[in-house]
Amino acid sequence: MAFRSIRHLRPTARALLVALWAASPASLAAFEAVRGANSSLDLVPDARSAALGGVRLGLPGEAGASAWHPAALLDAPGGWFHLSHAEHFVDSRHDWLAFTLRPGERDALGFSLSRFGSDGVPLVAEGEEVEGEGWRTFDVADYALTGAFARAFGRWRVGGTIHFLWRRLDQEGFGFQTDVSGGWVSDSWRFEGAIRNASGSGVVWESGWKEIEPPDLFLGAGWKRDVPYLYGQLRLAWQSAGVFQEQGKSGVEFSGSVADTANSVRLAGGRAWEEPLEWLSASSLAAEFVVERWVTLRAGFPSVGSPSEWSAGGGVRWKEFLRFDYAFRHHPALKAVHQVTLGINPWGW
């Protein structure tokens, strides 16, 4: 009777139930292992994280921590709404809306809704020539709903995140992903780790095809120090590339890097114990300087081995009510990306 009742649901709701069932351990064996199953979740959601080169581990967290380092939400103040917008390559756009909540001193909650997609993509058959404004177009998009929770146990903290995606490409699909993170934080030092795709990052397509990306471990460390003469605080952080998975971890190629025979390209960054030097070269660095809590300057390198790929930005904060952050990301081959985030605390007025 339960399966008969499912048939009466709308196709979207029915596909979501299938995706939830697919996330169970008993069904994961039917999935094909891939890289980048839900690649839109790898995008940096907010301007602060973007200006820091995507580094989250080793730094005090804000709303963007809910993406895959939920334990750092314990550093974020509650009651803030954040709205972010970025123009990516080939006219694709990433919009992100988030809200943080602090039900207690030991707990933190984060919720977000995002869309990444391209509108008005030309639909032209091979050999077809179209003149004037007679183009047929279509839209592609990923929508993601995220919930995160964190709790502190003295200097130790842990957190978890769950993502649900609806994907509209040439067919509809539903994705899921869970992330967990934790670490130890002192007055000056932070040592943290995060397991991305803890349950696997999977997609169930309308055609019945299922694919999943396996988990990976990321490590990070951070240090901060007050600078009295400059009336600010300096923060430095290091974040590793993925430890376990053999995949592209940098924007550049290194000699002796892992060969991807399927696509005839060379990927920079193997497993940590197989290619330790390349793994370290694919690590990320970030620096942040906060001036009296109202002006912040930021810079980051997404890959130490590719200094031509860098990011920078800053932010301003007005009392406990309004904040604005900006990030500029430079890539040696692709065009620059600008990202802005507006934060509002309605109760801070």
Image: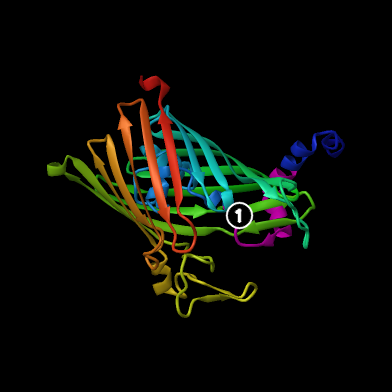
Q: Which residues are magenta?
A: 18-39
Asked if residue 19 is among those painted magenta in the image, a careful observer would answer yes
Quarter containing the N terminus = top right
When the figure is inspected, residue 329 is found, relative to residue 83, above or below; the finding is: below
Q: Is residue 158 visible?
A: no
- Determine which residue is flagged by label 1: 200
Left or right position of 287 against 35: left
Would you identify the image quadrant in which residue 340 lies?
top left
Sort mark 1 into few (<14), some (14-19) or many (20+) by Cα contacts within 10 Å: many
Q: Is residue 287 visible?
A: yes
Asked if residue 300 is among those painted magenta in the image, a careful observer would answer no
Left or right position of 16 against 309: right
Q: Position of residue 172 (x, y in %)?
A: 74, 46
Left or right position of 233 against 274: left
Q: Position of residue 249 (x, y in %)?
A: 48, 65
Q: Name the one closer to the observer, 26 or 197.
A: 197
Quarter containing the C terminus = top left
- Seen as rendered, the residue at the extreme bottom is 256
Q: Please tell me whether mark 1 sits on a helix, a strand or a loop.
A: loop
Residue in view at x 22 percent, y 36 percent: 292
Residue in view at x 65 percent, y 57 percent: 212
When the figure is inspected, residue 77 is found, relative to residue 234, above or below; the finding is: above
Q: Position of residue 161 (x, y in %)?
A: 52, 43
Would you identify the image quadrant in which residue 119 lies?
top right
Residue in view at x 60 percent, y 54 percent: 200
| Amino acid beneath label 1 | Gly
Q: Position of residue 304 (x, y in %)?
A: 37, 65
**Image colouring:** rainbow
Q: How many marks?
A: 1
- Seen as rendered, the residue at the extreme front is 132
